[in-house]
Image (tube, coloured by chain):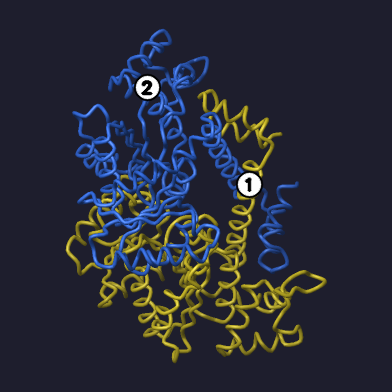
Chain colours: A yellow, B blue
Amino acid sequence: MKTDEKTRAPVARIPDADVPGTVERMRKGERRAIASVITELERLSAAAPALLRSLQPHLGHALVVGFTGPPGAGKSTLVNAIIAQLRQQGRTVGVIAVDPSSPVSGGAILGDRIRMTAALDDDGVFVRSLASRGYLGGLSPAAVRIIDALDGAGYDVVLLETVGTGQNEIDVAEVADIRVVIAAPGLGDDIQAMKSGLLEIADVIVVNKADRPGAEQTLQQLVGALSIRATMSDKVPVLKTSAINGEGVPKLIETLDQLGGKVRAEDAVSRRRRRARYLIARAASDIVANRIKAGSKGGLDTLADSVLSGTMSPHAAATRLLED
Amino acid sequence: MKTDEKTRAPVARIPDADVPGTVERMRKGERRAIASVITELERLSAAAPALLRSLQPHLGHALVVGFTGPPGAGKSTLVNAIIAQLRQQGRTVGVIAVDPSSPVSGGAILGDRIRMTAALDDDGVFVRSLASRGYLGGLSPAAVRIIDALDGAGYDVVLLETVGTGQNEIDVAEVADIRVVIAAPGLGDDIQAMKSGLLEIADVIVVNKADRPGAEQTLQQLVGALSIRATMSDKVPVLKTSAINGEGVPKLIETLDQLGGKVRAEDAVSRRRRRARYLIARAASDIVANRIKAGSKGGLDTLADSVLSGTMSPHAAATRLLED
């Protein structure tokens, strides 16, 4: 990748002089302009600062909804159904599909699905697939800038769909304004065991594939699990959807809009800063963890032995290490 | 929980004078002794240091194998099949089932499954269910001490089975000597997309449910995905198993033993310290992330704005923050 001599950022494909014009065309809904702005921001090219400055006055309109849940719960189908419904209501939709397979497969599998979905003739939908940094690496920081691009382009709702598991899903949950956890009946023991984990991060829980046997039972189990956590029970709605026939989708969107009202009470700058703070916190914790793994073995081994002998907790050992 | 006045650790249920006798009974395979040692270590009671000192000479025998993979891949069934096979070969097995549902359901769902599995009459198998610290919190540090307890009790193999997703699975992968990633045919787009993520951490990849249609295709896709990463292609075996009829399980165990030979070349102290170092690194990165989230908003907001404006990467912002 060619880099700018001064900033060492990737060379911009949009010259500085074209930035205002490009943003203007983007605001009018020109797909090529939107795509090229996203690409510049994804690459963090030399044009990114100027683009983000131009976008600034337009940011804070979009509601960012994150979708997470186990494989087999029908996340993609549900997201498609939500897109269709929002379009019927006349709202525009940006989609960021976070695809951990991209580094290996080039995202081909998801790519196909997205081509089907995106309804290329519909200017009211824009889908962008984004490689994750892998299972352990988590969400690319570029996602936060792509949210800004879609927001700046004027899309009413930005859907952030994660596929797969790991740090990725955790990051998507942290970056979204609203977190939807998708479950489904009949996924066996594993999904039962996942319940409480996923409950921790949910603003809305959806039992998808409600047309299948066991949906009501799954829903009741989730409600039961929530009721044990008294502070959450009256806050987290549990809904049934059947993405393939659209059942329950209008109610889900209504619920998202209700939650969206609360989100919008927070000012746009705070919401954006919260995302950036999370990315910085993640980066900092990665740096610290890597320093420790690579670090001087002498002092660390003494602490490791204290942890192994039960005389010190990992937390106490870490605190001691950070004090030095 | 009652705590010891001097150490502030939970009060020991095994008095100091009984520690050597308890460890002796544990070494003879007395289940009650094993269970009580595990409980003391899990609670990190006042008896833990003395117990770990007594166990010290016996540690480093067990091979610790971690199992991870998406819901629906049949992890539990495969682990059961492996237990059965190892027992036929006359080897003893300790199992730690990491169950993120425990905080809510008390682990009842898994509990049932484990009671079926454990073959209570068989003294050669010991199963312990361990609550995780939830989706975001990851593996309890107690897991590392329970590995020591099972190792000290003389079990030949310790299987660490994780259910669910998130930090939990990442931690199990880091703590195990050998990491087995389990896939299955027919889990749809999601499992395809997960491939590369899971490949990052795999020492062995298993396509379970090989009796089902599409198993060969899934296997070929995994082999193909691995071949793109040239450095890994000749190292990571991809095997087919059918846990319900035991097919492929002997070959899997053979492969684990081959890898185990390499693991055992590393000395026992280093292996244990590696686990403790990981726990310390995790704790340190949690502390740092929490400090940042709670920290002084003034300076952090400036850095957050730099990240949002594209003039600074999260990594650079984090480095700056850690320097202060």
Q: Is residue A6 left or right of residue A298?
A: right
Within 10 Å of the Cα at label 2, are there few (<14), some (14-19), or many (20+) other Cα atoms?
A: many
Q: Which residue is mark 2?
A: B37
Query: Which dot marks residue A290?
Result: 1
**Residue B200 locus on image (x, y percent):** 50, 56
Identify the element where label 1 is drawn: helix
Q: Looking at the image, is B29 positioned above or below residue B90?
A: above
Disc 1 and disc 2 on one polypeptide chain: no
Identify the element where label 2 is drawn: helix
Query: Which dot marks residue B272?
Result: none
Of residues B77 and A79, the one nearer the viewer is B77
Q: Residue at x 49, y 62 (%)?
A: A172
**Residue B294 locus on image (x, y percent):** 60, 47
Q: CA distance from mark 1 to mark 2?
A: 33 Å
Q: Residue furthest right?
A: A6
Of residues B87 and A56, the one nearer the viewer is B87
**Residue A209 locus on image (x, y percent):** 25, 68
Q: Is residue B218 left or right of residue B52?
A: left
Kind of residue sitting beneath label 2: Val
Q: Residue at x 42, y 63 (%)?
A: B223
Q: Looking at the image, is A274 positioned above or below residue B180?
A: below
Q: Looking at the image, is B145 positioned above or below residue A279?
A: above
Kind of residue sitting beneath label 1: Asn
**Residue A105 locus on image (x, y percent):** 48, 71
Q: Is residue A241 left or right of residue B133?
A: left
Q: Chain of mark 1?
A: A
- Split into 4 quadrants, where in the image is the C terminus of chain A? top right
Within 10 Å of the Cα at label 1, are there few (<14), some (14-19), or many (20+) other Cα atoms?
A: some
- Split into 4 quadrants, where in the image is the N terminus of chain A? bottom right
Of residues A64 and B188, the one nearer the viewer is B188
Q: Chain of mark 2?
A: B
Q: Residue at x 68, y 62 (%)?
A: B313
